[in-house]
Amino acid sequence: AHAIFLLKWHIDGALSLAASGVSARLAST
């Protein structure tokens, strides 16, 4: 269960990081 929780946590973090990167790139253009 801990492995699944950590995996989901890392995926959520990666998605939020990618989303912020995309919005930052869109804002810079």
Image: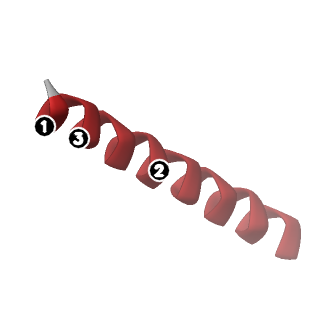
The quadrant holding residue 9 is: top left
Q: Determine which residue is flagged by label 3.
A: 7
Q: Are marks 1 and 3 in contact (CB under 8 Å)?
A: yes
Label 1 to label 2, Cα distance in Å? 15 Å
**Residue type, label 3:** Leu
- Compared with 19, 26 (above or below) is below
For the question of whether residue 29 can be seen, the reply is no
Label placed on residue 14: none
Q: Determine which residue is flagged by label 2.
A: 13
Closest to the observer, 24 or 5: 5
Q: Residue furthest top?
A: 1
**Residue type, label 2:** Gly
Which is in the foreground here, disc 1 or disc 3?
A: 1
Label placed on residue 3: 1
Q: Secondary structure at mark 2?
A: helix
- Compared with 28, 4 (above or below) is above
